[in-house]
Amino acid sequence: MSDTTLKSRAAALVPALAARAAATEALRRLPDETIAELKDTGLHRICQPARFGGAEAPLDEACDIVATLARGCSSTGWVAGVYTDHQILIGMFDPRAADDVWGDNPDALVSAGFTPGGKNERVDGGWQVSGSWEWSSGCDHADWLILGCLLPTGADGAIEPNYCIVSRADVVIEDNWHVMGLAGTGSKNLHVEAAFVPDYRALPFRLAGAGGAARGQADAPALYRLPHPPCVPFLLAVPSLGIAESLLDAVIELMAGRSSRGVRVAEHQTLQVHIAEAAAQIDTARLLVMRDTSEAMAAMHDGRELTPLERARNRRDHAYVVRQCRAAVDRLFTTLGGQGIFLDNALQRKFRDMHAMSGHFALNWDVAATTYGQVALGLDPQTNLK
């Protein structure tokens, strides 16, 4: 299936996702109907390896597709971005890991809890993993989960964070997700007791930062040779584009037909300036995403490593994209006046979702900006770029 086809299918789903957005928020997870639509259209396999029937879409095109879904429903866009991120990450593991996940069920979905932790012990052939993890977006529909686990896999047995893949059967989900924004993502807590993880389903964070197991395979697709932290989190940033772009369209349509005291609101210069500034911020964000992701894909095709400054730039832009989109959303929301605060106005949900999204650690501007400044000035970054 071509990436163009996936983009058009995502666009076709937007009206239905928008109509279901309030119900998605109330349910505090994606509705079964939404998951069924994603599966019917192949949008649950955007970056899944082609050998399992996935689209294996380049990162730049995957980002465009995810942003499109977010135009209809922020939570759906976020969860789609998370699932797609995990497809790329699994492609960086020993190929046997992907065989476990998709060999018997090519439609399998993968959620995660990435914060490293757990009580983990060495056993024959792998690891026994126990612990609790937070923020697992889309976990209710997941068949597998990736957990951040601290394992002695570093030099001389040093403890280091690893991604470990476990079956849904080994996980208990705690229904604790009661939030003011992105409520439909169902980003709940996970609890695991003595789950077995074979060695090939564990991948050190440092190797994912270097393209994982795929880096050493000459014929491995470029998508799975991307350094994960500097590149793949664009999939978490781009739902902000969908939110901002859809809010801009809605405000323009609304204001074009509104009058106040006999004067068309569209004739107010202040509104015109707000529209222009918001549009410029959104365009800037989109251009950064497309530049950074297409250049990263080109580097992988050419067999070139990203430089430290490129890695820092990408990390900067993950956060800056969201920062710009949030500023645009705030600017646009002020134009709504008192009408914007009613809970039956769908636009206030976009405002809340945008602010919830911008709180994600991977999208934190202060951390990302400091890191870029350190690298640009020739200093050692305090944040690991790999």
Image: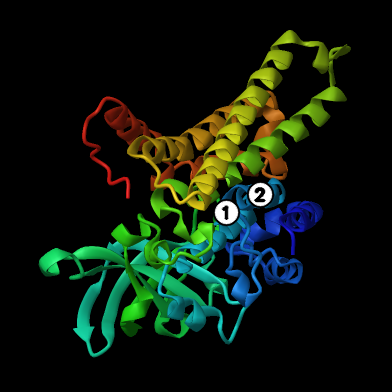
The answer to which quarter of the image holds residue 371 is top left
Q: Is residue 360 visible?
A: no
Q: In the image, residue 141 lies at what x, y percent?
A: 57, 73
Left or right: 321 as drawn, with respect to 190: right
Q: Residues within 10 Å of mark 1 (few under 14, many from 20)?
A: many
Is tag 2's residue or tag 1's residue first in the polypeptide sequence? 2
Secondary structure of the residue carrying numbered label 2 = helix
The kind of residue tagged 2 is: Ala
Q: Residues within 10 Å of mark 2 (few under 14, many from 20)?
A: many
Task: Identify the residue at image location x=36%, y=31%.
Answer: 369
Q: Nearer the viewer, residue 233 or 251?
A: 233
Task: Identify the residue at image location x=70%, y=27%.
Answer: 336
Q: Nearer the viewer, residue 215 or 282?
A: 215
Left or right: 139 as drawn, with respect to 381: right
Left or right: 203 as drawn, with respect to 13: left
The answer to which quarter of the image holds residue 366 is top left
Could you say which disc has been placed on residue 78 in the image? 1
The answer to which quarter of the image holds residue 200 is bottom left
Q: Which residue is mark 2?
A: 70
Disc 2, disc 1: CB below 8 Å? yes
Q: In the image, residue 272 lies at what x, y percent?
A: 73, 15
Q: In the image, residue 307 lies at what x, y percent?
A: 36, 40
Could you say which disc has been placed on residue 380 in the image? none
